[in-house]
Amino acid sequence: MPVLVASDLDRTLIYSAAALALTMPDARAPRLLCVEVHESRPLSYMTETAAQLLTDLGDAAVFVPTTTRTRKQYQRISLPGPPPKYAICANGGHLLVDGVSDPDWQAVVTARLADECAPLAEVQAHLAAFADPLWLRKERIAEELFAYLVVERELLPEEWVKELAVWAENRGWTVSLQGRKIYAVPKPLTKGAAVREVARRTGAELTLAAGDSLLDADLLLASDRGWRPGHGELHEEAWTAPQVTALPERGVLAGERILREFLKGVRER
């Protein structure tokens, strides 16, 4: 029976130039592989060692990229190794099977959102009314499922995010601040639910997972074993769970360490 490995991508396995955290002397910096290009510019990287580890992992387990990115944003990424049969996009809103969104899963998600939380339009209107043009740069709706703002982080009042989180909580939504983006996501829209569906379909006997943000907490809780890097929201909140290991590595080297742990977990089962 297969092992399922579900991993967040941004700031877990792949990193923008700003998130690499290359604190070592230049001569000792790892060789990097570009895995995403956007508008003719390199955007995301992993180490060459991590690329080989991911290739090995793809041969040994059912690897499932698990991201809050939209399908279009996910499709910009070119990961090393065999093409994943399954991928989870839009924070669990879309389950891709051989690159195509599964309609049965879409129907499940749509029904849950209608039953369990306030509509997207209400949240969108609140964000538009209360975001300050001083620090707001962009407003976006992702896949007609959730909303996010792109902000100038240094100008963003910390209290504004806390107040938004309380408002959202009362309407069945959750808020996550990741870099320059503030996400407002319906609580029923989770990576963990989608990963459990993939585990059911594949008959996986073991699920391993990794992630760095509050939106990854349920993913880690849905796993038998999980890892989080030494950066990101989960690290800042000192979040943990019995099956989750907090790693000391930060930046792109954390991605390499996570892949080593995945492979070790697959081989030790």
Image (tube, rainbow, N blue to C red):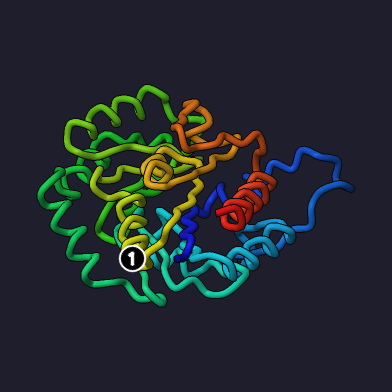
Quadrant for the C terminus, please: bottom right
* Residue 96 picture quarter: bottom left
Whether residue 182 appears in this view of the structure is no
Q: Residue furthest left?
A: 115
Q: Amino acid at mark 1?
A: Leu
- The residue beneath circle 1 is 95
Which quadrant is the N terminus positioned in?
A: bottom left
- Write down the quadrant of residue 85 in the picture: bottom left
Q: Residue reaching furthest right? A: 27
Relative to residue 88, is residue 108 drawn left or right?
A: left
Q: Is residue 96 visible?
A: yes
Q: Is residue 181 left or right of residue 36?
A: left
Left or right of 127? Residue 171 is: left
Q: Position of residue 99 (x, y in %)?
A: 40, 75
Q: Residue at x 36, y 60 (%)?
A: 199
Image coords of residue 126 (percent x, y):
21, 39
Q: Nearer the viewer, residue 249 or 168?
A: 249
Residue under the image location 34 percent in, 53 percent down: 140
- Above or below for 173 versus 39: above
Name the residue nearer the viewer: 91 or 202: 202
Residue 9 position (above or below residue 52) = above
Q: Is residue 45 above or below residue 244?
A: below
